[in-house]
Every structure is written in C-alpha cells, then in structure tokens.
Amino acid sequence: MITEILKTAEVKSLYEKHGSALVAYVCCCGVDFASAEDVVQQLFLKLLQGHTPKPQTPLAYLYRAVRNASLNLRRNLQREVEMQESETWLVAPNGHPEEVLTLQAALRELPEEQRESVFLRVWAGMTVQEIADMLDIPISTAASRYRYSLEKLRERLQLVAEP
Amino acid sequence: MQPHDEDLERYLKKFQPRAIRRLDVRRQTGNSWLRRMAAVVVFAGIISLWYAQRKTAKPPEKPRIQAIRNMPQTHMSTPVLTKLALDDSKAFDALLTNESRTVLPSMQGEQSALRVLAND
C-alpha cells in the first residue's frame, strides 16, 4: 500500500495560510505565544519530514494536532496555564492593543469549549459541521456552544447588535 | 444565525491572528543533513580504527609455538617406534639420542625451548 504524504510545497502553503491562526488557537487554549509558535513549528517540521500520511482534511488535522500538542504541553507543565493577560495573539484592525486586550479578556472568560468553538468558527473559518467533526461532538452541541459563546462575548464586549 | 450574531462575527473577523515567524525549514533540513554527515564520519572513523587496530595489533605467534613448528619431523612412524622399543630397547634409546640432537630445538638459541618456557 502506498502512503501518500504532503509535499513540501503543500506543507509550506498550509503554514503560510494557517500558521498564524494555529498559533493564535494554541494561545487561545492557554499557552504563551512563544511556546505556541514552537508547537506549530514542530508540527510543520514533522510534516516536512514526511513521516505523516497525508490527512484527508488537512485543516481539521492541523487544528486537532496542535490542540493535542497544547494539551500535552499544559499537562507536562503540570499546571493549569492561564491565558496570558498582557500578551496579544490577535491584532486589532486599527492597531490599538487595548481593543485586542479587551477582546482577549472576553474570550478568556468563556468556558474553554465555547472559546474553542468561537475561535474555530471565526478565525479558523470552519463550518459548524467541521467543528463538530473535529471535536467529535454532535453538530447540535457545536452549534449551541457557538451560539452561547457569541451571546457571552456580546455581553462582555457591550456591543449593540442591532442599530 | 441571528443578524446580530453576524454583526458580531464580522466584528470579530476584523481582528487578525498575530504574525508568526517563518517556518525554519533550512535549520531543520540542515540539522538533519549535518546529523547524517556526522553519523557517517563517526561510523567511518570507528571502522578505520578497528581495521587499523586489527592489522597492527595482530598478536605475534608465540615463540614456543614457532619453535615447535620449526622442529624437523622424524621419519619413523609411531607404530614402528613402538615395535622398536619393544623389540630392541637399546636400539630405541640410541635412536632417541640421535633424534634428540636434530629434532629438539637448540637450547642456546634465542628461540630455544628453555628460554621460551622460562619466559612463560
């Protein structure tokens, strides 16, 4: 049986396209930015070595892999890593770090599974179905998690949804 | 999805993940290449050392063995010698005395049996 692997160009392209979002996702899982970068780099370097068979859905694979890696990292540290309060892993459109810190604080207050669902939907660009598949949960659960996370975020960000 | 959810989603999407460092492909491939080269060099070094040692450190044949190997062989076989010993003991003694002059190694030489035994 011939196992197909990701070509170097494909790996590089995936890194260019999703690398920063993956790092932000690992940060969102409660890992500092430098360690998150290392986690993502290691994953891609492993892919470049060609030991990993080509995944059917590369995006879901990448998020699942960094999720597991970040969980392992946190477990190895033997402590619950709190998201860094002053460290930014998002960039505001106007470049104001205060706005980013407010948003990150609001995300930090969400339960982990809700934070994860909003990240995967908004910044990873996954559909609710893809989120459900990736997290191995029913689609209704994924949808409700996302809905609740938006509600809570709206409250915290004090956004007026309707003009 | 509610319209206000879409607004919030749009708002959130304005935030972009922070830029990250480039994928350090060269370091990885360079490292693995260097590791392989180092492994080859070490392996070659071990092999050549082993070969050189094997060649030079070949133990010299022990002088005693050499001395025994240098002994001239007697022309008479064991049954003949046995028969002679039984039939004519005097002739047998004479033969042994004669043979001892030629068969036994010189006791004064550098490789003499006595010296070899004394060294051992």
Image: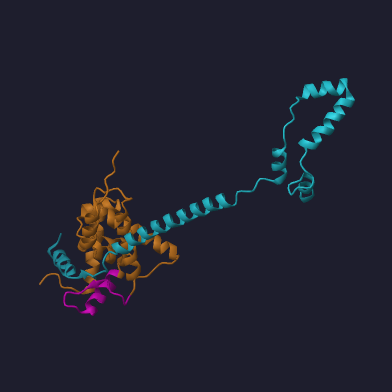
Chain colours: A orange, B cyan
Where A130 sits versus A3, above or below? below
Quarter of the figure with residue A36: bottom left
Quarter of the figure with residue B24: bottom left
Q: Residue at x 17, y 67 (%)?
A: B13
Magenta-span inclusion, residue A47: no
Magenta span? A85-107
Q: Position of residue A14 (x, y in %)?
A: 22, 58
Q: Position of residue A162 (x, y in %)?
A: 12, 70
Q: Nearer the viewer, residue B80 or B22?
A: B80
Q: Nearer the viewer, residue A1 or B61?
A: B61
The residue at the far right in this view is: B90
Quarter of the image that includes the N terminus of chain A: top left
Q: Residue at x 72, y 42 (%)?
A: B67
- Horizontally, residue A11 falls left or right of residue B107, namely left
Where B94 sits versus A70, above or below? above
Residue A133 in view, yes or no: yes
Where B96 sits versus A147, above or below? above
Question: Looking at the image, how many numbered discs can be counted on the residues?
Answer: 0
Magenta-span inclusion, residue A100: yes
The residue at the far left in this view is: A163
Q: Residue at x 26, y 76 (%)?
A: A101
Quarter of the image that includes the C terminus of chain A: bottom left
Q: Position of residue B37 (x, y in %)?
A: 39, 57
Q: Residue at x 15, y 73 (%)?
A: A160
Q: Nearer the viewer, residue A56 or B22?
A: B22
Q: Nearer the viewer, residue A48 or B59?
A: B59
Residue A66 in view, yes or no: no
